[in-house]
Structure formats: C-alpha cells, structure tokens
Image (spheres, helix red, strand yellow):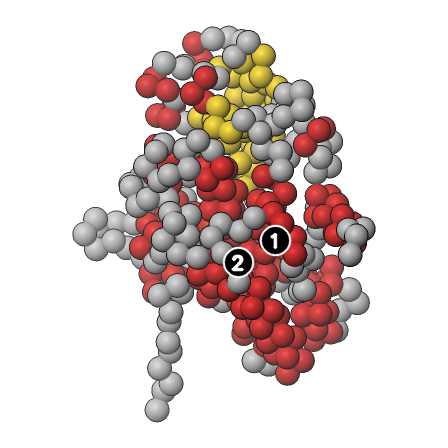
Amino acid sequence: MTEEKFFSPFHLFSNWGGTDFVYPKLDQEQGEEEKRSFYRSWKPYLFRAGFYDYILGKESYWGFQKKLSILAEEPLGVSLALSCMVEVNVAGGILLASPYSKPESHFLWDSFSGIEPFPIVSVGVSEPGFDGKLRKLTSKLENGRLTGVKSFITNGGEADFVFWVTKSEDKNPVYLVRLKPETLQNGKIQLDADSSVSLQKEIFFTPFTPHVSHLRLVLGEYPISPEDLILEDYGQLGMELRLKELLSLVSLLIGKTKKVSLENPKIAFERNKLIEWWKTYLSHLKGNPTKDALLEGFPFPIQTLVLALTEHWNLKAPEELKSIDPDYQLFVWEDSFTKYLIQKKKHKPT
C-alpha cells in the first residue's frame, strides 16, 4: 500500500504549484497561466491561506511564524516565505507604526487585504557605505525632491512602491516612491516630462532564494508631495523590524531542516530543542512584538543546529553549507547591523 502524503494548507507549492513548481498551476477559468512574477503570482494564495492575517490583526505573530515554517519545508518554500515575511515584517511594520495603522486607512493596505492586483511594497534602507547605521544614510529630500541610492531592496524587482528611508537632521523620515507608471499620483507625475528627474533600476538575484528579486534604485530629483510622507522617523523602529526578520529566519530554518532531520538523529535532537524554544518564546509574545520583547530572546539560538548540519555534511565551517544548498547562507551570513545587535546584547548590563 502506498503511503498517502499529507499536505498542510500552508504547503502552497504542493497544493497549487504548476508543472514547474515555481508558479501556481493553471487557472482553469482563465485557461492560461499568468506569468506575472514569482512573489506576485503567489500573493493570492498566500492571502487565502492566511499568511497576511497577522498584519491585518486577525491572528498572533506566533500564528504567522508557524505558517512560514510549514511553507519553508517545501523545496522553493524558503524563497516564497522570505518574500512574504519581508513584506509583512518590514513594509507592514512601517504601516503599523504610521498614521495609517488601520487596514483600509491607506491604499497600500491593498498589499495584504486580498484586493487584486495585490500591489507589492518594498523597503529601501541599505545604501553604499551605510554599514547598518542610519546616521550614515545620505538620501535626502530638498525642496520637495528626493535624491539618493538604495543598494539592496528585497522584492524590489517586483515592487510597485518603495518605502524610502532618508536622513533629516536627527530623524529618518520615510517617503513613498512609486515605481510603475500606473502608480504615479493620478498621472500627475511624469518622470520623462522633467529632464531633471531620473529613476534608474537595476534588478538582480542572489544564489540563495534565487526566485526572490532584489533592486538597486537610484533617484535624482524625484518629486515628493506632502502626502508621500509615510513615517516621520524610522529611528528605533528599524531595530524592531530587523529583529522580526531575524526571528522569522528561525522559523524558516526549522522548516528547511525538517527533511534532513529525519536522516540524522543529532540534527533531529538540535532541531527539536530549537522548536521547543521557538514555541515557548513566540507563544508568549503578545500583540505586535516590541523591540524590547524581541531583544529578550536575542541572539536567537540557531547555532547548535547549524553546527549539526555542518557536521552532517562533513564540512569545515558553517559558511560552507551554501555548497550543499545556497539557501543555507541565509542562516549563516550576518550583516553589520546584526553584528551590532549581538555586541549590544553582550554588553547589556545584567
């Protein structure tokens, strides 16, 4: 007798994947597949499965993380889970902290509310020479014109909008930038109508999560109106949002390692330890987790599982895990801001 496979509603590729298991299968009513783009093509399915329920105030953060972990069990699940968690944690987090914190209070909530065509909102923070320090940002707004460079905007290749973090004296205002002609303000801003305005896009991909698009974006004299101010100060919020991304990576690692844990008892042991910590820690986080609550659990304890994986494949160091699967680089690589957080926690008085 053949064992019947069980697919969770959150195994989106197993339930809805097409023959290539990259895009959703054919919509029988339309008769042909929409080749929109990776994340955009899956957004309706993410919505129906409840992946946006947390940001809409319908479930706990713990509920959101459980869904991400299950999705990450699938071969391309880490890519889709990454796209989803970045938009929810960062773009959604900025909306929650803004004057437009209630769903339906701004058209950008359409990104999460099941309204076709599901716009995508990305966030631009990183700049050349930024080193994770907001005080080093050089993007600035002068006389209603925004000029600057953002070097790594996740989901940016598919984005309709970018929340652009700037520097203004001791604050970091966030402005809305429209990337596509149909999203310009009622057609009033025509980038090619003013020779002083420039917008240069460079879409790129990484070896890990290869279906997630990233963007390098250069703006010159881009017109900004008063209603484009989304948040007066990114400031301390930035740390909270980065911690949420790092915590979500724990969920992705748990999902990613499910299959290999069935082959190796040590990996299974370390993974189960991490799962117990994950369940206990996340289930006690109430509402929208704050920076202080997230710092309590940081640095998140993934190291022993990562080392068990390294040993399993007879590698010399965790950095070599990318030779087994490039996605593992997500759980090994530390950016300058993550290193700063680790040092900050080490030197915190007890």
Using the image, determine if residue 86 lies above or below residue 285: above
**Residue most toward the left?**
29
Using the image, determine if residue 28 lies above or below residue 265: above
Residue 304 position within the rendered picture, expressed as x and y whole percent measured from the top left: 71, 70
Residue 230 position within the rendered picture, expressed as x and y whole percent measured from the top left: 47, 28
18 and 269: which is toward the camera: 269
Horizontal side of 42 relative to 293 (left or right) equals left
Instruction: Name the amino acid type tagged 2.
Output: Leu
92 and 328: which is toward the camera: 92
Where, by quadrant of the figure, is residue 154 drawn?
Answer: top right
Q: How many residues crowd around disc 1 within 10 Å: few (fewer than 14), some, or many (20 or more)?
A: many
Horizontal side of 9 relative to 137 (left or right) equals left
User: Do we see residue 177 in this rendering?
Assistant: no
User: Do we see residue 168 in this rendering?
Assistant: yes
> How many numbered discs, if any?
2
Q: Earlier in the sequence, mark 1 or mark 2?
A: 2
Residue at 61%, 27% (x, y): give it.
172
Using the image, determine if residue 57 lies above or below residue 77: above
User: Mark 2 highlights which residue?
Assistant: 285
Residue 57 position within the rendered picture, expressed as x and y whole percent measured from the top left: 38, 49
User: Mark 1 highlights which residue?
Assistant: 294
State which quarter of the image contains the C terminus: bottom right
Residue at 70%, 53% (x, y): give it.
333
Circle 2 sits in a helix, a strand or a loop, which is it? loop
23 and 342: which is toward the camera: 342
**Residue most toward the bottom?**
1
Q: How many residues crowd around disc 2 within 10 Å: few (fewer than 14), some, or many (20 or more)?
A: some
- Residue 137's disc number: none
Residue at 71%, 65% (x, y): give it.
303
Where, by quadrant of the figure, is residue 158 drawn?
Answer: top left
